[in-house]
Every structure is written in C-alpha cells, then in structure tokens.
Image (cartoon, rainbow, N blue to C red):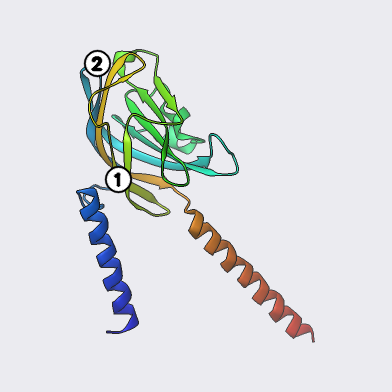
Amino acid sequence: MNPDSRKLLAALVAVGLVSAGSGFAADSLAPGEAMGTFSIDGKSVALHHAYAMTQPGDFDETKTDTAILLTEEPLSPDSLAKLKDLESAAQGKGNSLLLKLDESGSAIREVVHHSALGEASLQMSGMTHSGVHVASRSREEISGSLATTEEETFLEHRYKSDVRFRAAGFISDPARQLFDSLKLLLVFAAEGLLRAVRFE
C-alpha cells in the first residue's frame, strides 16, 4: 500500500469513528442545515438553518470562542454581509438558539430567542442547559448535535432542545492557524534567502 493510500484509509477510518460516536454521519446534513427542535413551556419550534463563526473569547479576548447559531428562518443576505458576531445577528430575527464553545470545545454560553418569550430572551453564561457534541470541524463548517438531557427549568421557563447541525461559516482552527503561520514564516525566510543569494 502506497503512502497516499494509507492516508486515505486513515481518513476513512477517522470519519467512520466520528460517525459512529455521534450517532449520525457528519455529512448527512447539507452545509448550513439544522434538523431538530427546541421548546419553551411546551411550545416547540423546528430549527432549519445553522451558522458558525469564531469570535474573541467572552471571558478572555486573547482566546477564541466558536459561536453556533441555529435558526428557524434563514438570515438575510444583508445580515450576513454586515455580520460581526452571531449573537447580535440573532436579535430580532425570530426563533433561534445560540451556543458558544471555548477553545477546548466546552459549551460556555446559551442564548434562546422564542416567540413564547416575546421580546425577551433566555441567557446563561459559564455553563449551558444543552450539552454539545462536536462530530467534525473544519475551517468552513462545524457539525454535531446539542440536546438537554430532559426538559429543564431555564430562568423559570420549561426548556428542552434536541438538534443536530452542520453549521457553515468562517471557523478558525487554532492548530491550523499555527501551521499556516509557520508555513508563512518559512516562505518569507526562503524568499529572503533567495534575495540574499541574488545580491551576492
């Protein structure tokens, strides 16, 4: 077996392990798609659209959080063009569920917009009611699922979630960023060496 075949086999095995661990194939949803529901006080809403974006950390701006926004209706092209952060993008845009993950992948913030709440929203920082499982992640998308273990009390409201998603957007990968930075430094160093050789 040649090296390329070994790499392909390893990738296929990894995908199989991810799919088995998550209970569904990471590519069973289209990019930007969500499937599932969340409810407030027994009123259920289906979520169809999924967005993701990396942002400065809520608790430490030198670190990077990943925001995942799941919505009933799609965000408008105008909203996406002016997008600065997903939490503000969800305000006044109907039913939605937002989760933030820290660099370790732990869920650290949850924001719920639901018609049953009127203009208000439910927010929690530092922990979340919904547990998040990340099945796969790339620079373009993040796939996984989120769910409460049962119907829970969220600021005096009954709350439940069970959604899987394939959120599309700009998602930086810290390890990949380091690799790209080192690669860029090597390119600059090589160019500098070539210029020095030319002038000698």
In percent of width and height, residue 186 lies at 62, 71
Q: Secondary structure at mark 1?
A: strand
Q: Residue furthest right?
A: 200
Quadrant where the image shows the C terminus: bottom right
Quadrant where the image shows the N terminus: bottom left
Crowd around label 2: few <14 · some 14–19 · many ≥20 (10 Å): some
Name the residue type under label 2.
Answer: Asp
In percent of width and height, residue 187 lies at 61, 71
Q: Which mark is residue 144?
A: 1
Q: Residue furthest bottom?
A: 200
In percent of width and height, residue 67 lies at 43, 38
Dot 2 or dot 1, earlier in sequence: 2
Residue designated by label 2: 41
The mark tally for this picture is 2
User: Residue at horizontal 41%, vertical 28%?
Assistant: 90
Name the residue type under label 1.
Answer: Gly
Crowd around label 1: few <14 · some 14–19 · many ≥20 (10 Å): many
Q: Quadrant of residue 17?
A: bottom left
